[in-house]
Every structure is written in structure tokens, then in C-alpha cells.
Amino acid sequence: MKKIVSILVAIALVAFLIYTLTYHKKVIPAEAPGKVLATGAYEKYFGAAPKVDKGTAYAFVIYFPSGKEPGKVVPFPFFTFDEASMKRLAVERLLGGMDIGSYAGQFVPFPSGVRLIAIDEAQGTVTVNFSRELAKSTEAGTARAVGLTLRQFRGVKDVRLQVEGKESELSSIAKKADDTAVQQLSAPRLLSLTAMRDKGAREIEELSAFFDRPVEIKELKMLSENGQQFAGEIYHSVFDMAAVLRPKEPSQFKERMPINVRWKVVDKLGREAEGDSILLLEIKEH
């Protein structure tokens, strides 16, 4: 039996840090705790992985090409319960970009229309075959993003890039990519504010303030334009990527209404941040 798990991580509930995760449901004894297995890259940039109640999840990094520092990449945390499709998921998510919320316009996108044809692994080498649109790219950050994203996974020693089955000029750049290409990571950011409701329903169920990484919420309030705090229970989302409000009066919330979010958080490596942000509410259906 398969179960669809939707997460933030703007995380789509929001397209960058939220995407649909499919995993096989397993019978797990009630006393067995869940666990998250993290790559070395994840632990280096984001610290210890958050916990899950049950099952086995996998934490890894996707590197996006930086628009601020050409040739460099920016790491973002992602999670899945499906180990078998992790590499493909990472590449497809990379192609999708991160033009989201407070990061809009800060990354170099892959050429329009580029798609993943195939991804194969043999004797420690991962070969990634892209459609012909990739040939339009001369951006070193693009190649480094693919190379670093895939080489973090256990057993991967080399990455080759192809365009329609032929070796790409970007392949040598991907092969040589190392940590010197990673842009220094800043303090946590509030990414976006999203509400969820059942398909066809008139009222929302909950509002999620998404952050760009797992955080501990020190303080968070959601306020109306006139400064009135919205009543309801606030709790952490799965993987600690969002603060979620279950409002007492769901009928108050409308698409694109401005909401003032006052927040203070700290990430797993002790980087603190706070803000007073006015965000327009996005409402999505599931």
C-alpha cells in the first residue's frame, strides 16, 4: 500500500522545500522509534537531522546554482521516505528550481524545457542524461549543482553529464566540483506562508509558515493587518520545516490576504534569526 506524504519543506505545499513523497507503508511495532538517515553533506550544512515518529526517512542536500555568486551553489535540505528513487528525485527537483518566496530571483535556472531522460549508476559512476535543451547552458554552477548533489550519496564516486546520450562539455566541471563551490550559508529565512484546505472546501484547515531549513521555533505569532493575533494552536510540522497554526476561526482567512508573521528561530547548528514579515497568504488544496 502506498501513502502520499506531502511536506514543505516551501518546502509544495510550496514547490522548494515541499513536494510529494511516496513510500511503502510498513508494519512497525509501536515501541520502534522512527529514524532519519542523513548524508554527510546534510549534517555539514544543517546539523543533526530532525526526528520522525516512525519509519525510515532520508535527509540530503540539493545544491542550486547561485545568481549572486556566479559559478557557486547554495545548499538546501530535502527529505524523502523512498531511498530507491532519491537520486532521480534530487535531479528532478534541481531542474524545477527554487524561485520561491524569499528566494525568488536568487538562483540561475536551468535552460527552459530541459528534462531528465535517464539516470544510471554503475561501479560508482552516476550518468545523467538530459534533453537537448541542456546544451544551451554554459553556466558552471549548473554542472557543479548536479555533481555535488549526486556525489553526496553513498557509493557515488563520479558523475557524468550527457545531452541526448552524448557526453556534455559540462561533465568535466561536474566531476571537479568540491566544497569550494558552495556559497556560505546565511541564517535561517522565513520562506512563505501557505494554507491548506480539502479540495472543494470553503475553509482552510491550517496555516504553515515555512522556513528554508529545520528550525526550533523560539517565538511565532500570526497577526492581522490591525495587529490582532490569530487564535489557535501552533505546532511544528514534520521535519521541523514549518510552524503550523490550526486556527480557531478558519473563515477569517482568504487567498492573498496579508498576514504579519513575527518569528524567532534557531537552526540545528545554532544560527539564530528573527523577523517581522508581512506575507500574502497562498491557499492550496489537497
Image: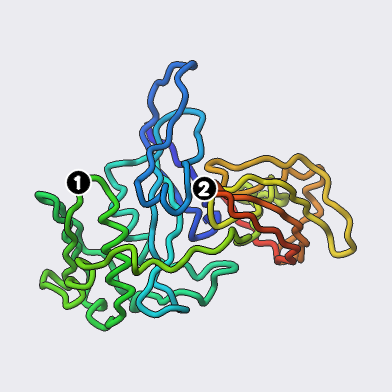
Q: Amino acid at mark 1?
A: Gly
Name which residue lies at 33% across and 74% down: 141
Q: Label 2 belongs to which residue?
A: 7
The x and y percentages for residue 114 are: 30, 73
Q: Nearer the viewer, mark 2 or mark 1?
A: 1
Left/right placement of residue 216 relative to residue 269 reads right
Judge the density around disc 1: few (<14), some (14-19), many (≥20) Cα neighbours within 10 Å.
few
Residue, disc 1 = 155
Secondary element type, mark 2: loop
Q: Is residue 137 above or below residue 124?
A: below
Quadrant in the picture for the N terminus: top left
Residue 244 placed where, x, y %? 67, 46
Please tell me whether mark 1 sits on a helix, a strand or a loop.
loop
Residue nearer the viewer, 77 or 134: 77
User: Is 275 left or right of 190, judged from the image as shown?
Assistant: right
| Amino acid type indicated by mark 2 | Ile
- Give the Cα distance between marks 2 and 1: 27 Å
Q: x and y percent of residue 61 in the render?
A: 39, 54
* Quarter location, residue 216: top right
From this view, report whether residue 128 is shown above or below residue 59: below
Instruction: Tell me where residue 110 appears, x and y as whole percent.
Output: 35, 75
Give the mark nearer the N terminus: 2 vs 1: 2
